[in-house]
Image: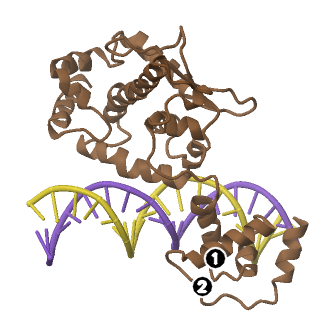
Chain colours: A brown, B purple, C yellow
Amino acid sequence: METETKMANTCQGQEEDADLRRGPWTMEEDHILMNYIAIHGEGRWNSLARCAGLKRTGKSCRLRWLNYLRPDVRRGNITPEEQLLILELHSRWGNRWSKIAQHLPGRTDNEIKNYWRTRVQKHAKQLQCDVNSKQFQDAMRYLWMPRLMERIQAAASAAEKKEDSGYTLQNSAQTSASSAYDAQFTTFPEYQVKPVSENYISTPSDSVVTQVSAVSDPGHDHYSFQDFSATQMSCLDNQANSYGVCPELSSQMSSWGPNYAEFGENLWSSEDVWLLQQQLCNTI
DNA sequence: AACGTAACCAACCGCCACTCT
DNA sequence: GAGAGTGGCGGTTGGTTACGT
C-alpha cells in the first residue's frame, strides 16, 4: 500500500490522459504492461497505467492482464471435465462467473462466461427453451452431463489400456498425455484419476469404473469432479437407470439406439433436438 | 471466388461495494 | 460520516474468423 501511494504520488505530475486508447491491444502495449508488472508488481491500476506510460484506463490494463497476459492463464478449448464443472457449478450458483472461475484454475470468468453464452445458450436455443428453464436443466443433467462423463471415462479407459500394454508412467497425471482428459491433469496437479470401488459411474457397457477426484482444499469450498460424481450417483439412485437419465427419457433414448451416442456437446442434430423437445414436452 | 451468416472472443460499459482521505 | 477513487463483477458489443451456399 505504501509503495502504491508512492507510485501514485510520483506519477501525479503526469498529464491527464485525454487521449486514452481503446480497442485491441498492440504487442507493444502488452510488452509494456508485462514488463511493468514484472518489475513493480500489480498495484493500483490507474496509477500503474499512467506510470507505465500506457494510454489506457486502469480498468483496461487490469482486464488485459487478468484475462490475457497473466502467465497462468490457460488458453485453448474447454475440456470435457471443465465443461462438466461449469455446468454443475452454474446450476448451483447461476451467473457467478468469477466464483465458478475460481474452481477452474487458469480459466478466466470472461472465458467461462463466453463459453456459457455461446455454447450452452446455443443448445437452449436449439431446444427452444430458456436456458434457466427446468426443461433445459433436465436436458443438461440427464443427457449432456452424462455424455460428458462418458467421454471423460472413455478417455481414462483408453489411458488405462495404454498403461496395461506396457506403457511406463511416472504418475497418474501423465497417464494419457494425448487425450483431452490429460490437458486438464497435466495442468491441474490437484486433479487425478484413480480406480475406486465406490462412488463410481457405470457406463452402459459397464466396462469403465473410474473416479475423477480432486484433492481436498481445507478452508476453501473447492468443488470437485468427485462431488459431481456423488451428485450424479444420487440421481442414479433416484432415477434408477444406468444412463443417469430419468425413466421417461431413458426409454426414449434406448429407442434411439446408436443415435444416443451422438449426444455430444456439439453433436445435437436437428433430429435429436426434435426428439428431445418431444420428450421434454411429454415428461414435464 | 464471393458473399452472407454464425460462432467466437477480446474489450468495453455500467453498476456496486469497498477503501481511502 | 461524506465524497472521491478504485477494483471487481456481470452484461453487452463489435471485430475477426470459420463455415456454408
A255 shown above or below A217: above
Q: Quadrant of the C terminus of chain A?
A: top left
* Residue type pointed to by label 1: Thr
Find residue A279 and report its image quarter: top left
Judging by the rendered image, the residue that carries numbered circle 2 is A20
At which x and y percent is residue A136?
33, 35
Res A57 label:
1
At which x and y percent is residue A61?
64, 70
In what element is the residue under mark 2? loop
Going 31% across and 32% down the picture, which residue do you hit? A135
The answer to which of marks 1 and 2 sits earlier in the sequence is 2
At which x and y percent is residue A138?
34, 29
* Residue type pointed to by label 2: Leu
A18 shown above or below A108: below
A94 and A154: which is toward the camera: A154
Q: Is C7 on the left or on the right of A235, as rendered? A: right
Going 24% across and 44% down the picture, which residue do you hit? A126
